[in-house]
Amino acid sequence: MSGLNGKLKSTAETQLQIATGALLESLHDKSTTVCETASVSLLKLSEKYPNQVLLSCVAFFTNNTKCDTDHIVQMLNIMNKICIDQISGIDGDTVIKLIEFGLMTMTKSNNYEPLVQLAASKILVALGRVHYIQVTDALLQKLQIGMVPHYTVPHTLGSLASVNAYGVIRYLKDILNIILPLLGGLKNDHLKESFAYALQNFCEALLEYGSNLEQVPDPTISTETYTTELGMAYDVLFTSWLQSREPTVVESVLEALSAIFRALPIDKVTQQTPRLIPFLLNHIKKNSNAYVVTKCLYSAIEKTAGVNGMLLEPLLSNILSHLSDLVCVSPDYAQPDLLRSHSEVLRCYECLALHFTDITIDKLLGHLKNNNEKEKLKGLIVIAHLISYSSEQAIQRRYRDILKYINELLSDSHIKIKTILVKIITGLAHKGILTEIDLNPDGPERYLEFMLKMCCKQHAKVFQVEGNELEDIQRSADNALYMLTTSMPELEDVLWDLFLNCFLTSLYDNAIVILLRCLTHIASRKESKPNCEAAFVRCIVLLSNPTPSLRGTYIVNFLKNITLYDTQSCRNVWDAKIPQLLKYLEQTYDTLNLVEWQDLLFSFINLLLESINNEAFNNILLVKAKSLLELYGSARIIPSIDKDELQVKLAEKRFLIKFFAVILCHVSSKELVSPNIENSLLNVTLTDYSDLQACAEAMGICSQKHLALVLEKLSHVRKEMLNKKSSKLFSFMKDQRHDLGVERLRYLIIYSYSEICNEALSEPLLRVVESEILDFVLQELSVSKDFAIKRTCLKAIHSVADAMHPNRNSLHIRMNSRDKVIEAVSSQMHLHNGPEYIKLFPLITSAVTALIKLPVSLESEERIKLIKLFFDNIYNASAIYCKINSSSMDSYYGDLKLVPCVTKSFSELNQFVQELILQNLSPATLDELVTLLESWLGKRKAEQRLPAIETLRVVLQTYLDNIKFAYDCPHTFHQTGMLLAKIVPRCTDPNNNIKRVAVDCIYLTLCISSRYEGHMRDHDKVLSNSLQHVQKSIETNDPQQLFNLTSDLANVICQNLPQFQLIHFVEGLIDSLLDCESSSSNGSSVVLNITLKNKGGDLQNHVSHVTERLIAQLDSIPFTRTKTSALRAVVNLAAHHPRVVGGILLMQPLPFSSCIIECWSILSTDRTLVQILLDQIKKHLKTTPLYEEQGNGDIKIASLTPLQALCALHELLRNTHLKDIFLEQFAELFSLLLISLASYIGCTAPALRSLSDKKQQYGLILNRDAYKLSPARIAVETFRLFFLCCEMNNIATNLLAYTDIDTSDNKLMILDIIETLVNNVSSENPQSISWIVACLGPFIRSELEPQKVAVVAFFTYLLKHGAQSDQTVLIENLLEMILDVQLDQSCLVRKIGLEGIGYAAENLKKELVSRYCNQILGVLMNSLDYHSVGTESNVILQALLTLSKLLKALEGYKFNAFQVTAAVRIKPLFTQEARELRQASIRLLGDLTSSLSPESNLEAFKEQIQSNIITLLLHLSDPDGEVIKACKYTLRRVGPYLESSETNQMIQEHLIDEANLHYSDFIKDLIKSMAKEMQDLFTLFVMTSVSYTKSPWSEIRSNAALMTGLLYFDLIPENKQKISLDAVCDKLIRLLRDDSDDVRFKTSQAIAYLFI
């Protein structure tokens, strides 16, 4: 490579060799992308210089003998690609050299190096596609008679034969004559593999040649031409090489033999078959790759069978024996050779079955007899293949035997056997074998039933396979069965009978969908709809739960295609209801309500039976239902059923029990009904409560028509079984534990009584309900310890009470022992006895509610006792078992197990109190309830407050809805004040639901009060309208909105509160200030304030009392906001008592205590005092230094006195009613606050001693509390309050962003604050600007830098925002002061001043700027005359920006004197690492270009443009996006001065600021355009681009390389001579070693452009 790097003569050809060599070296780059790019570049070069590139590759390979293998292989692959793609462009000399190179590379090493040697072989093969004569001749030269060639030579000849058979065949005779004598003497395995490979391809080429004789050049050549040679080759390979111990050699030989054998003559085949096939069979187990053996075996069998099948007969047994071992039972798709071997084996079987049917089939059937499952699978796999793919003549006469053995395997339990049997049965059915009586006399039923069983759900644990695999098997069986049903009409009758019988059993429930699909299809094809009562019953039972596998739709579709009873009325109901059921299912599958759905089914059944009205038919249905019930009775003992399926079946059974009862209701014969009721009781499962409930519901349904019979049977059970007497009827209980049976039987009886009370007709029921049912249930409730029985007893008592309700009690029978029943029921309510008792709460409450509805009404003591019992237990249960979750409305009370029971208890409790109110509608009853609820309304837990306030709302609503006035009724309502005071805290409760309900209660209370005040019902609408807004918005969490709503609520209360209730209301509110919730306490204080403000004049006789109570409460109020509001209430009640002590308050230590703060807050309400305080505060801020510096000036400590004054001002400013006072002194206060803020940034509080005294360095810290203060934060907050007080809310809001000023690392945050202030003050208070400037002016000469920065920044931002631009004198003063500070020592002050000059240029009038232009230019040019960028970078940057602004502002102004100078000074800044400097300097060049005029020195400036154009183009790929935009801007400006219209047009069209630039494509097109009109400059451009190959940014280096290549590519020949190609190539080749992948990537591309 050293010779290629510059020591050769400098010519383009030499440089092409150097570049190609560099690219070839890059092929081994560590980056894959670079390698690929180098490869692409080489291929691109080869398109123009294929010969040179190929020769360079040869030279590189020759000169670099130590390259690693991967590198060489990559290069050889590229050469191969070039030879394939550019074969027509390769000249003869190059072809000869490449052939020599290829042969040399292949054969120079005698070692076995296939990666390199075979890659070189591919080059020869690629050349041989066209130049096969030269390649073959060269290879034949390496193939000398009697000399063993290199292994790659025959391999290459073989490969060449595979791609160019027509070209090689003409040489085949000579080749074979040379290599055949050598075969016997070859010892090297690689040579054997190579020769075998060559012979294989020769034979395949010969067969291809012979099969296309009409297209070949010499039709006389055929396989017979080479009979002798092929026979000799076969003998050597078979007799010698197959004995090799090297597996790869054997595989190669077998591949060759499989090709050679097909080309052998008949006599040779006859001779060799008895030798070859046994050898192959013996070799199967020795070779790891069975594919090559089976492939060869198939070739031998196929050829031999075609020549003389009798040759195979002696070998047949051995062949079949070995083939069976190669059948793949479990295909592994990760091993394709194994699958290919399996396919070859099946082809062998197919061939043998055609010629030796009986022997082959007998052998396969022998496999089926074997007890080994694997052997069975092998036989079945082959038989399935033969049935599906072999001709019918092959095995037609053996189908009977096959079916016999298949029939025996149907009971096999192996899942894989079952799967293959499905395929076999499907194939037999489609060939009509199953329906041929001669072949299958037993019929197809058993086979079809087997397929149906395969459609059922299989269990993975049983078969030890994956669940997904089982699902696939089941799905395949489904598809196969449905395909048979729909495609074979001859099987329809058989399938109908079989499927219908299977449908009526539970064994095929898992295949119910496919059963129904098939049955529906067959039924739809029948001429008349079939009748099937049993199927109807089965369908109705399955429809009870239609969701499993979405079976409901299939069931209803099946019902549409059958009929139940052949009458018109039945058909009308059938045709009307079936589509309705189907539509309901389709619309509600996702949200199906099973109870509602089952009610629809029962309604359909009743309508159907009523329309039929046939006793005999009903008896038939009873028989079918009874038989089906017996079938479901065995569901629990099915071993394979899982839990979910079992639950579905049990649910179906429970539905069937009720279905059975519905049918009984349509049977009138007592002789038939009685035993069936008895049968229902006999079939119940006593261990399952769900079955007991279903049986009880069935008893209830039967009682609709047969009440006496049902009661008789239940009474018989009670007498016989519960008295522990033996009974024939219940002999089934002998095998169960008697006690458990008795308990379950009690449960059944009581539940049945409950259902009877709900379902039976009233009149016959009322005569026996108390004596027959209630007494028994009460007895069981008192003695039973089983909670299930207790729950059932409570439901039964509720049902009895409902049955005896006056609305149903037409006989007016009264419950004699109601009070005892209430006591018995309520005594079951126990909170702390366990969760089981909690579950009884809703049942107890609802039962008591139903009982108290019966005459006579409860007395007061009984009422209070029940109310207190229910409140205590239910509300405490809520606190224990509920947890409110406001974010989830579905589980608002939490998700604990007992939550549903507790929430149900709330509803039942509300029903209970509502009934109490209705029974005794009086203020006394209301007072009882409110008194008992009062303690619960103020509980700490919202889980108790919410149900309590909801109960109160029910009470008030019920009272209001039912209140009546008469002469004997109370005419006054004394509870209004106290009731409202108790509700008001809940209106601001933290829980939104409580707030909403509380507002409703306020409304209801006011409505009740208004009624007693004499208002009519219409007045309720007035109250509703006044509270409408509050009711809608009260759930808000916004404090301000909630305050407003609470105020509105208080106003409404004040307007509607009776005069005599005011004192009670105020006293109650004062008590409510101590509420446990802060929001509630605060809300009470808000209402109290408004009440005292609005109605305080009406409390003349109670002022002293109210004040004493209010002050007494202040110390006890736990919440700050409430306490503050309570202080305001004192002010409202006392009507202002101003008391101010300004001097004392100013001297208080920092930070101010809460008491002092409250005092300042109160004092701020006195306007006169505020004026005095402000004067004191301003004096302290003006006359005292704001901070002191200690140490070396690194520590700044705020002075105490001005900081105290600032804190006092802070508290005064909290009073937003002092707007006019502060506006009068706005300018002075604003300037003082601004200076204070700027000074306090970085200051600590006045807490540390001076550290100058070493002895006191570790002394005590003074004023420890003040140490926690942040002066800067206080200043910002005071400033914000100042603006709030002046109602400049926008400014105050903007200052909120700077509350972290004390913790921020941004030391220049003050500049952001000042700009915000200038912007806002200029818009909101512009008239104060001149006064502010006057107040700030003196501080510009301050000795403290922060104060100077603040003043200059304020003036600068005034110019920025154009404030007061019409006041010329003010503006000139600002501009002069800013120009003066350019001599300041502070770089920050100067930088801000330059920024201000820029804003002046932008915003001031042109005449004014022109007047100061020379002075400004002098300042700017001085700033650009820098010596070190680092120390003054910010000043330089600002000078650049300001100069750009000035150039834009003064368009037409003559800047001729300094344009070129400025361009020269900014040029070094283009490559600065600071992004801002690059961006500003590049953009300034564009602005300077825009400022050019005819008087400018255009030629000198164009030189600057031309020298910088490449820089600008390269920085279009700058790492920073803003620099890219600046480049686009400047390029658009300089474009017209490039003197190339096309280039300018491209720049203007493509360089859009916000658009994404495809840089490489753009540069390629742009350079092509530039080449047309700017060739004179391309030499400069190339050298400039080359110089940027050392840029610190990889993006610039990479694109500099690419641009160099593109520029050189477009150079005209004359200009190329002016550039040292050596230098350019050297630079680019160096970049190929760059660390950046992108640089190496684009350099690889660029090198190609140098030569194409």
Image (tube, helix red, strand yellow):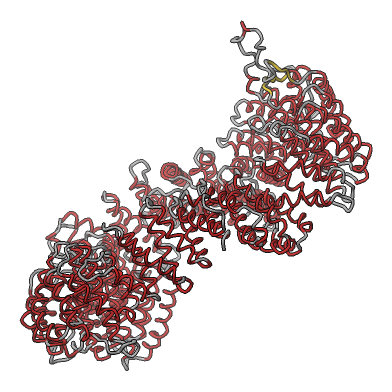
Image position, residue 1164 (x, y; %): 78, 28
- Asked whether, in this view, residue 1013 is left or right of residue 672, the answer is right
Q: Quadrant of residue 27?
A: bottom left
Can see residue 1135?
A: no
Asked if 804 appears above or below 159 in the picture, the reply is above
Can see residue 68?
A: yes
Q: Quadrant of the C terminus?
A: bottom right
Most distant residue in the left direction: 314
Residue at 59% of width from left, 54% of height from top? 1621
- Asked whether, in this view, residue 277 is left or right of residue 502, the answer is left
Q: Quadrant of residue 594?
A: bottom left
- Asked whether, in this view, residue 1493 is left or right of residue 182, the answer is right
Image position, residue 1339 (x, y; %): 83, 26
Image position, residue 1200 (x, y; %): 72, 18
Asked if 3 appears above or below 719 in the picture, the reply is above
Work out whether residue 709 or residue 1367 is closer to the camera in this orientation and state it: 1367
Asked if 905 appears above or below 1473 in the picture, the reply is below
Work out whether residue 270 or residue 602 is closer to the camera in this orientation and state it: 270
Work out whether residue 1538 or residue 784 is closer to the camera in this orientation and state it: 1538
Most distant residue in the bottom direction: 527
Total numbered badges shown on the rendered structure: 0
Q: Quadrant of residue 105?
A: bottom left
Asked if 983 appears above or below 266 in the picture, the reply is above
- Asked whether, in this view, residue 584 is left or right of residue 1515, the answer is left
Work out whether residue 1145 or residue 150 is closer to the camera in this orientation and state it: 150
Most distant residue in the top direction: 1255
Image position, residue 1134 (x, y; %): 76, 29
